[in-house]
């Protein structure tokens, strides 16, 4: 493994063209840590007289292909590029050969702006801790740079035959041909995006686990799905780099590597474990978070053969990684500062210090107070909101003092489903979740009376408005809608609102990843 210190490189002499990550990597980066993407970009740095050859791969980022680059090798970095007078971190990810005869090479580099803010988010003292503690993030960076958004969005043949679509999927819907086509397109695109995200995350996870020399997902899934005398698996495994780090309570006389042990036997051992007493496995190789395997060639051996079951014991600060099984196909792996979870269908990677939610209830309280509502109205709304936020596919909620007139305006333009006013406080959580399953927003007033479902928000985009291409359609449409209201743009340009009360509104966006954004007309910048 090769270590390179790039601290002496003069960045002023280089032509740096910052590039943003594409939508899919940006979305996953913000799941890893909310709003992380706004600190990030990436670039290529051309470097002279520094060539080497290591085992390579056969893929390249599309930007590298445009520059005529070929893969030279992956580097192990303990250091990073940094200018003393800059508040940015230039973090090298991979190296590429450009032209061997001219002795040119290039680096793909992630640029982290606002170094102090970034380090405080992660609770790091030095940028190098990113490399030591955040391997999944490094792989997110690497595969994010390589990511190519030119996916095939060719629709199935059904798309071209509205009659076939109606007979197959919409026979009782009462929808027009144009509505059926639009609904089908949206659902198909959502399916494709979900599939792309799943494949991308699987590649990130597999690549990171390989680098960490940990067992792959297939092993963890097999263990999670194993039973012992009819009992689900809720056991714990602790991985250590060497014997000196282990605190053993029970030591096995016969110790064997994981690949030599029957899965049923591993499951039997896990039945004895708990949060305090865990199954201990130790690496045969000399692993450490910086240099990985001592012998570079060892990177390509069987990861299962590297880990030896030694006994039962308690967790220590020297843990390399730990995994908790949560029943069939569910588990949570912790390594460094990161947590990888699997719920049977989807992977989720996040940093330990990432907030579990992006919003504070005080944002909502401030809005209700500003529009003259009492505490009872606020508490009633929270009960309704706490039910709706459990919508696993994500949704949007609009609270407007002029909800009745807004429902009339939008639904008359076929931008929503107008309903007879209904008091959401009287509805069960199940009913609320069913009503918010469809695309679009639920439109209610501060008393929780609902006037429309599946509302598609409109808005006028003027020069001062800044969207966020790293976020989805719900987020940007909600932000634009509230921006228009806040700045009275609609009243002054297109005469949207028929009722001045509509100028007091709040949009709450609940993403499928569980994060929540709040925009209000009283404070447009609340997020």
Image (cartoon, helix red, strand yellow):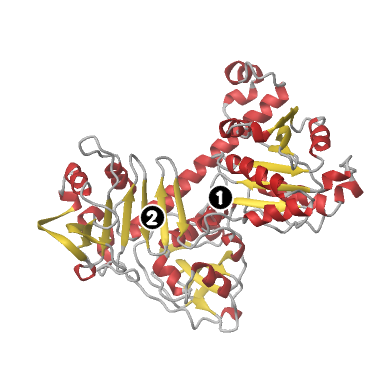
Q: Which residue is nearer to you in this view: 124 or 206?
A: 124
Q: Quadrant of residue 444?
A: top right
Residue that appears at 22% across and 48% down: 270
Q: Could you say where residue 398 lies in the image, as x and y percent from the top left? A: 72, 42
Q: Could you say where residue 247 lies in the image, as x and y percent from the top left? A: 21, 66
Q: Earlier in the sequence, mark 2 or mark 1?
A: 1
- Which residue position is annotated with label 2? 207
- Which residue position is annotated with label 1? 24
Compared with 131, 373 (above or below) is above
Q: Is residue 106 visible?
A: no
Residue that appears at 26% across and 39% down: 226
Compared with 100, 68 (above or below) is above
Q: Which residue is nearer to you in this view: 296 or 455?
A: 455
Q: Could you say where residue 311 lies in the image, as x and y percent from the top left? A: 17, 58
Mark 2 lies on a secondary structure that is: helix
Q: Quadrant of residue 441?
A: top right
State the count of labels: 2
Q: Is residue 507 visible?
A: yes
Mark 1 lies on a secondary structure that is: helix
Disc assigned to residue 61: none
524 left or right, relative to 124: right
Compared with 113, 464 (above or below) is above
């Amino acid at each position: 493994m090769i270590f390179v210190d790039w601290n002496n490189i003069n960045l002023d002499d280089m032509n740096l063209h910052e590039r943003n990550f594409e939508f899919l990597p940006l979305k996953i980066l913000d799941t890893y840590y909310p709003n992380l993407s706004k600190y990030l970009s990436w670039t290529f740095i051309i470097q002279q007289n520094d060539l080497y050859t290591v085992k390579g791969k056969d893929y390249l980022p599309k930007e590298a292909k445009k520059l005529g680059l070929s893969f030279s090798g992956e580097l192990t970095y303990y250091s990073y590029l940094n200018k003393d007078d800059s508040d940015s971190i230039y973090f090298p990810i991979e190296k590429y050969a450009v032209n061997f005869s001219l002795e040119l090479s290039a680096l793909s580099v992630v640029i982290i702006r606002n170094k102090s803010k970034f380090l405080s988010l992660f609770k790091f003292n030095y940028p190098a801790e990113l490399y030591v503690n955040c391997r999944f993030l490094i792989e997110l960076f690497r595969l994010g740079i390589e990511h190519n958004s030119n996916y095939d969005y060719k629709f199935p043949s059904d798309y071209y035959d509205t009659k076939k679509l109606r007979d197959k999927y919409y026979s009782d819907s009462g929808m027009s041909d144009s509505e059926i086509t639009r609904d089908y397109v949206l659902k198909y695109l959502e399916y494709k995006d979900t599939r792309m995200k799943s494949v991308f995350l699987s590649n990130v996870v597999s690549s990171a686990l390989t680098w960490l020399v940990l067992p792959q997902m297939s092993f963890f899934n097999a263990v999670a799905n194993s039973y012992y005398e009819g009992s689900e698996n809720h056991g714990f495994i602790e991985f250590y780099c060497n014997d000196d780090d282990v605190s053993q309570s029970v030591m096995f006389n016969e110790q064997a590597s994981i690949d030599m042990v029957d899965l049923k036997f591993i499951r039997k051992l896990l039945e004895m474990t708990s949060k305090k007493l865990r199954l201990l496995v130790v690496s045969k190789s000399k692993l450490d978070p910086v240099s990985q395997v001592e012998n570079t060639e060892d990177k390509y051996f069987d990861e299962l053969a590297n880990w030896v079951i030694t006994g039962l014991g308690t967790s220590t600060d020297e843990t390399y990684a730990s995994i908790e099984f949560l029943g069939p196909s569910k588990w949570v792996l912790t390594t460094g500062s990161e947590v990888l979870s699997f719920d049977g269908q989807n992977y989720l990677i996040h940093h330990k210090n990432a907030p579990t939610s992006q919003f504070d209830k005080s944002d909502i309280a401030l809005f209700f107070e500003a529009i003259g509502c009492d505490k009872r109205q606020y508490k009633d709304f929270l009960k309704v909101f706490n039910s709706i936020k459990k919508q696993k596919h994500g949704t949007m909620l609009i609270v407007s003092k002029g909800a009745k007139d807004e429902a009339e305006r939008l639904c008359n333009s076929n931008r929503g489903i107008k309903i007879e006013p209904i008091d959401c406080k009287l509805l069960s959580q199940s009913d609320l979740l069913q009503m918010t399953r469809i695309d679009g927003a639920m439109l209610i007033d501060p008393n929780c009376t609902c006037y429309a479902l599946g509302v598609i928000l409109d808005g006028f985009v003027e020069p001062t408005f800044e969207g966020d291409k790293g976020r989805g359609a719900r987020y940007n449409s909600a932000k634009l809608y509230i921006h228009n209201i806040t700045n009275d743009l609609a009243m002054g340009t297109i005469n949207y609102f028929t009722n001045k009360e509509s100028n007091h509104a709040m949009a709450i966006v609940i993403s499928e990843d569980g994060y929540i954004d709040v925009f209000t007309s009283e404070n447009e910048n609340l997020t």
